[in-house]
Image (spheres, rainbow, N blue to C red):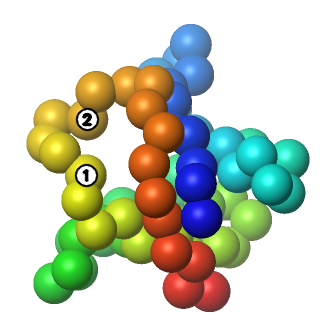
Amino acid sequence: MKVMLRKTASGQLTVYVPKKDLEEEVVKETDSPTGKIFTLANGWELEFSNLAEPLKLPQTCEARRLA
């Protein structure tokens, strides 16, 4: 699914999912063998396989929902 990553004015990383009209803060970042996993405040886990370091925000990218 397409999502948008951005930082709030307070510096918190947020994820916006347009199809669900959902915007949540990232509460945990984990590295996985295939990329990064972001855990959102609502409990969702999204896997990003091709994020460049350091993140250039805002950006739209492809994510896969794990939970």
Q: Is residue 22 visible?
A: no
Left or right: 8 as drawn, with respect to 52: right
Local crowd size for mark 1, using a 10 Å CA cut-off: few (<14), some (14–19), many (≥20): some
Task: Say what secondary structure mark 1 lies in.
Answer: loop
Left or right: 50 as drawn, with respect to 20: left
Give the position of the N terminus as an image quadrant.
Answer: bottom right
Q: How far from the left and from the top, in percent, is residue 33?
A: 16, 84
Q: How far from the left and from the top, in percent, is residue 22?
A: 80, 50
Q: Are marks 2 and 1 in contact (CB under 8 Å)?
A: yes
Cα–Cα span, label 2 and label 1: 7 Å
Residue 16 against residue 6 in the figure, above or below: below
Q: How far from the left and from the top, in percent, is residue 42?
A: 74, 65
Give the position of the C terminus as an image quadrant.
Answer: bottom right
Residue at image point 65% right, 73% down? 44
Task: Say what secondary structure mark 2 lies in.
Answer: loop
Which residue in the protein does label 1 denote? Answer: 51
Local crowd size for mark 2, using a 10 Å CA cut-off: few (<14), some (14–19), many (≥20): few
Which residue in the protein does label 2 denote? Answer: 55
Residue 16 against residue 64 in the figure, above or below: above
Q: How far from the left and from the top, in percent, is residue 50?
A: 24, 59
Left or right: 54 as drawn, with respect to 30: left
Residue at image point 76% right, 46% down? 18
Q: How many marks?
A: 2
Amino acid type shown at disc 1: Leu
Q: Is residue 30 visible?
A: yes
Residue at image point 38% right, 25% down? 57
Which numbered disc covers residue 42?
Answer: none
Residue at image point 45% right, 25% down? 58
Where on the picture, by quarter, is residue 19? bottom right
Amino acid type shown at disc 2: Leu
Where on the picture, by quarter, is residue 4? top right
Residue 5 against residue 33 in the figure, above or below: above
